[in-house]
Amino acid sequence: MSEFPAIIRGGGDLAAFLKTNKAAVDAALDDAGALLFRGFDVPDAQAFDAAIEGYGEPGFTYEDSLSNAVRTNVTPRVFTANEAPPSTEIFLHHEMAQTPIYPSKLFFYCEIAEMKGGATPLCRSDWVMDRLAKEAPDFVARLEAEGVRYTNTMPGADDAGSGQGRSWRSTLSVETKEEAEKRLSDLGYSWEWREDGSLRVTTAALPAVRKVSKGRKTFFNQLIAAFRGWSDSRNSADKSITFGGGEPIRAEHMAPAIEAADKLTVNCDWQPGDVALVDNYTVMHGRQPFEGKRRVLASLVA
Ligand code: FE2
């Protein structure tokens, strides 16, 4: 079993390192699923932006995404990882796997780590699938046959107090209800308007298992985060996920997946200047609650 995440220690300019060693970095990423670059000279968001530029792959922009998180851009391709309050835990997920449009990789950068807690848990999703295939083969078979649907309610205006607080206008990149309905119908979603101006949507059946390199399969979905965490004034987590056919996914279905993921999770404890590169198809990530000052920025690769 390879080191996870693999730590690449260095010094000097990370942008130059990534540009020169792109092929070796990608091979290491395919092997480990997540890389932590430590000891390089990455003092601020601009240096992080330059490092991503050095890596040289096209970005995936927050505006174009259907992400539910409220975020703020720092540079055109770098944004705050999630504006949810420090006390809110963000449970393991593959970025945007609850939508049909998701990034292939994620970069994280730690600018400030003056906090208690606040690690980024990382979990190899292929290892989760290996366990689930043995412990809950019926559940896996249904996920593969039916896929899954996610339901969530988006507010009329951004609510930074929630991990699911992005408004429907921002999420769908629209201004009016008519434009929202057009976009949802193009996406194959169903929807319902609420009296308070919020919008409840249910996705089409989306794949929940993904084939990745070397014949592996990953638990590529948002089930754990949705089941454990999609609770706010508008959403209740236990109503957020169903199998593709519409039957609710319940606690007894989720228990073996949650247990396997918890056992396999490794915490990335941040030091200022750290940069992590995560394969979004192979590795789940989250955020532990924290107290104090923490600034972790993110950027997505298309
Ligand atoms: Fe995320």
Image: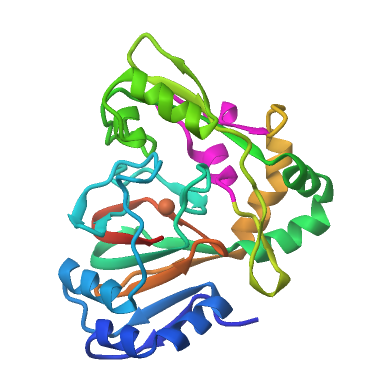
Q: Is residue 9 left or right of residue 207?
A: left
Residue 241 sits inside the magenta stretch: yes
Q: Residue at x 43, y 47 (%)?
A: 90
Question: Is 238 in front, or is 140?
Answer: 140
Question: Is 158 in front, or is 18?
Answer: 18
Percent position of residue 142, x then y: 78, 42
Percent position of residue 291, x then y: 28, 52
Q: Residue at x 33, y 83 (%)?
A: 18
Q: What is the quadrant of the C terminus in the image? A: bottom left
Q: Is residue 214 left or right of residue 199?
A: right
Percent position of residue 115, x then y: 27, 60
Q: What is the quadrant of the N terminus in the image? A: bottom right
Q: Residue at x 50, y 61 (%)?
A: 280
Q: Magenta part of the protein: which range?
A: 221-243
Say if residue 152 shows up in the picture.
Answer: no
Residue farthest to the top? Answer: 195
Question: Is 170 in front, or is 294?
Answer: 170
- Residue 293 falls in which quadrant of the image? bottom left
